[in-house]
Image (spheres, rainbow, N blue to C red):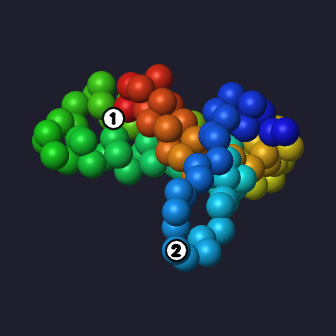
Amino acid sequence: MTLAAAIFPIPKLPIPNSPFPIPQYQLSTINIMKIKHMVNLHKGLCFPLILGLMIIYHNFTIGPLVYLALHGTYGFLWLLKDRIYPDKQWEEEIPTLTGIIGFFTLGLYSGV
């Protein structure tokens, strides 16, 4: 059992009196993304998101520029590190719904 399946157990949903032979899939077995995809997408989108907010609000003062430089550089270096030295712990496959929830949870944590 994977860590994600242990944390988010999803029961098998039966379809009562179905005239069609619909295969019963357990949602937690549909693993099409890895944990690293969720984290890398979040860190990689920091630069375009911050730059977009600066353009929308016409705010190019020193504070937002420093914030953009720090977070943009950190996101770029994170993606570079992942390509050069991939971490085996981030290779675990997770359900798509868990990845989406995790992505928005990271957004609440980082405040971006």
Q: Quadrant of residue 46?
A: top left
- The disc, 1 or 2, on the residue closer to the chain's N-terminal end is 2
Instruction: Point out the image quarter for the N terminus.
Output: top right
Which dot marks residue 19? Answer: 2
* Image x and y of residue 107, in percent: 43, 32
Foreground residue, 42 or 28?
28
The answer for how far apart the CA atoms under marks 1 and 2 are is 61 Å
Q: Identify the residue shown where x is 13% and y is 41%.
A: 58
SS category of the residue bearing label 2: loop
* Image x and y of residue 19, in percent: 52, 74
Q: Which residue is mark 1?
A: 65
* Image x and y of residue 16, in percent: 53, 57
Residue type beneath disc 2: Pro
Residue type beneath disc 1: Leu
Q: Quadrant of residue 54?
A: top left
Number of residue marks: 2
Discs 1/2, front: 2
Q: Is residue 61 left or right of residue 76?
A: left
Q: Is residue 18 above or below residue 73?
A: below
Q: Is residue 50 left or right of residue 57?
A: right
Q: Is residue 54 left or right of residue 22?
A: left
Q: Identify the residue shown where x is 47% and y is 23%.
A: 109
Disc 1, disc 2: CB below 8 Å?
no
Q: Is residue 3 above or below residue 55?
A: above
* Image x and y of residue 48, in percent: 38, 50
Q: Identify the residue shown where x is 76% and y is 42%.
A: 90
Give the class, few, some or many, for how many residues have Cα within 10 Å of label 1's Cα (few <14, many ≥20): some
